Amino acid sequence: MARAMPGSCVVYRCAQLCAMMLLALASGCVSEQQKISATRDVNAVFRTEYERVLAEDGTHIYHVPRDETFQALRVALGGLGMRLAEQSPDLGYLSVYAPAPHPLTRDEWLRAAQADLPKFRGILEQHLGLAAWFVSFEPQGLDVVINATTIQVRGGTAVSLTMRMREVAPPKSGYPRREYAPPTAVRMGLRKIWDALERELPPASGRRS
């Protein structure tokens, strides 16, 4: 004889089924054009935030020769799980990539995503209505690509970073991909890279940015 499910399990299961039904109903009312328009607006807002983050924290200057800084940066990025895509020591250029959410850990990514979800869904709601509140950030199927330059300046080396997302597999949700990572994730990722780089540089290297 089958055992009866505890009352709490029944309630939880009913809540799951209701959520699934609401999602199906909401998603069924969203057209492809609405999805495209919503993603376009998210990209516009996140691009502005991304550019602001880079202006504030995308370039640091260290009192270290360029060759030494370049080597330290390569080691730092590798230690964060990033894979080498292209490098030119002569030009001071380095490109690395890794599956999202690198260079963040899963827990760091969840904290960043939680911080940006209200704004994300608020933008989507203007186009999608109720369906917006069932859409989440999807790191699956994306690579994070980081491009770095090291340029010799007076007294040291200027290091500049950019961070973008590259699709490697279609999103399971069916929504178009965003071009820019959530702003909080960008801030956290940059901070993590700078910290890793500074651990690789001489203690007296300093920073004036």
Image: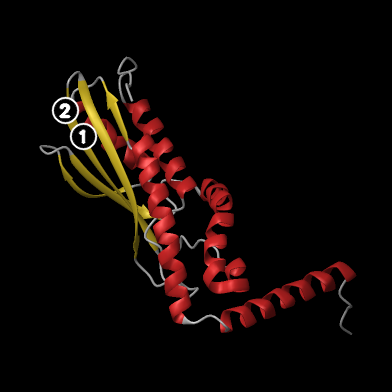
Residue for point 34% across, 38% down? 55
Q: Name the residue furthest front.
A: 126
Task: Identify residue for label 1.
Answer: 150
Residue 165 % position (x, y): 36, 57
Q: Amino acid at mark 2?
A: Gln
Query: Measured along the vertical axis of the image, is residue 124 above or below residue 34?
Result: above
Q: Is residue 45 above or below residue 53?
A: below
Q: Tag 2's secondary structure?
A: strand
Q: CA distance from mark 2 to mark 1?
A: 7 Å
Q: How is the image coloured?
A: secondary structure
Image mark for residue 107: none
Residue marked by disc 2 = 152
Q: Position of residue 30 (x, y in %)?
A: 53, 80
Viewer-proximal residue among 162 and 65: 162
Crowding at mark 2 (Cα within 10 Å: few <14, some 14-19, many 20+): some
The amino acid pointed to by label 1 is Thr
